[in-house]
Image: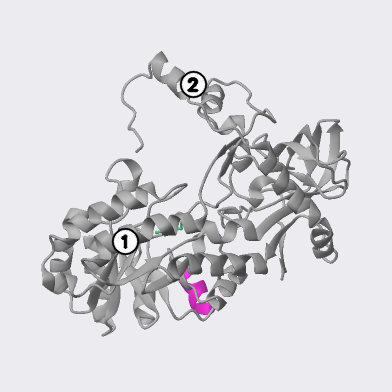
Amino acid sequence: MTQTAQGPISPAEIEAAVGRPLPPFPEASLRAFVARHFDRAPFYMDALRNHPPPVYLLETQVLAAGARRFMAAFQGALPDTAFYYAMKSNNHPEVAGHLLKQGFGLDVSGGPELAAALDLGALDIIFSGPGKTDAELDMAVRHAEKVVVLMDSFGELGRLEKAAASRGAVVRTGVRLTTNPDGLWRKFGIPPDRIEDFFQAARSCPHVRLQGLQFHTSWNLSPEAQLRFIEMLGGVLRTLPEGFLREFAFIDIGGGYWPEQGEWLHPGGTPEGMIRKALGQTVAAAAPRYRIPSMPIEGFSEALVPSIERHLRSVVPCRICFEPGRWLVNDAMHIIVSVVDKKASDLVITDAGTNAVGWERYETDYFPVLNLTRPAMIEHPCHILGALCTPHDVWGYAYWGEAIEPGDILLIPTQGAYTYSLRQEFIKPLPAVVVVV
Ligand SMILES: Cc1ncc(COP(=O)(O)O)c(C=O)c1O
């Protein structure tokens, strides 16, 4: 749980943060990752034949294989499931389009995403997120046969009732539950101890059919946060009147599954690195690197399913819904740039900037930069920087390859999640999207 700042930070607190050891990156698994992508260099180069860098390269087969694996992990283990792709994690229409073909519905969080989902012909859409406007609610009402609105507050219930009544429609809905009442996560949903009040309030809204619950925890490197919430929710459900429980058609347990590769960090992403940056020091080292482990999706399933059965489905034997985003798209898209300028043996500038990912990801997160033009299983320290007029435009502090020269093509693999959707029009043109099977 995050802590709210209270008074000055003591030297002991700083020491504890700095001294907290992070797991070092296992060299063998990093080398295997790099080798796997170098082995595919001819495939990547071929994809560039008609599309010079910079590009986002979307591999639809990787996407489809991940979708099948995610579904299989839970479908076999639970009697009634539904899967919704969280469009926010990568909003390229081909991504959602391919996941629809795999049997996913779509999870949208705003009007533009809802419009895109409808344009794609999606028939099963959930609309979640705080602060839905009247116009967005009206769009959901107009497509009520395709959209389930996951309401975020008592106020939204009232506004949705009004919107649905004005069109003579009845809307299927659920309500989102707050998973953490502290800090900024309190903006999402209603407190679980108000579920009964919410069902009571919905009874006086004839155009709103309340049928389920939703919660979402983020950044799950393990299922711990989900398990804690499921157990607590089970306790609340047991106190609800039978009449309400009978109305439940689904419980949506959200997304937030971290990809199996784990979280990869530079020194700049560690507590020590962040403290050093706050002190104005430069933290731009190529090593050491850290990997915080995650687990295979089957491991999530093994832990979550018994808990869902015991705490939720034993009380309400309903459908369980999933809203993954990051896990599905992370591995399916890569970024490919080329070197424009070599300013020193350890400093190159590329043709695209990190406006392509929309945030300063690589100042904290480590991803190998692979020189596809001169592949070699050796990593050289080198500042690989973008072309924007800001020093916060970093792809990496090293590259894998024999050498690096102007014109070389560099691959940054597995960049599909929360990069493309966050891209910004800023100074340099954005990469084109190349879709390969
Ligand atoms: C309500 C909700 N569901 C699903 C997701 C998708 O999360 P992830 O991409 O981490 O799986 C998010 C992400 O913010 C979310 O807010």
Q: How many marks?
A: 2
- Residue depicted at 63% across the width and 57% down the height: 331
The answer to whether one can see residue 204 in this image is no
- Residue depicted at 66% across the width and 69% down the height: 61
Q: Nearer the viewer, mark 1 or mark 2?
A: 1
User: Ligand 1 falls in which quarter?
Assistant: bottom left
In the visual, does 127 lie left or right of 358? left
Q: Residue 174 versus residue 313: which sits nearer the camera?
A: 313
The residue range painted magenta reads 112-119
In the visual, does 260 lie left or right of 356? left
Give the amino acid type for the residue marked by disc 1 in the picture: Ile
Give the image location of residue 224, x and y in percent. Answer: 37, 47
Q: Which residue is mark 1?
A: 308
- Residue depicted at 62% across the width and 71% down the height: 94
Q: Which residue is mark 2?
A: 19
> Mark 1 or 2 closer to N-term?
2
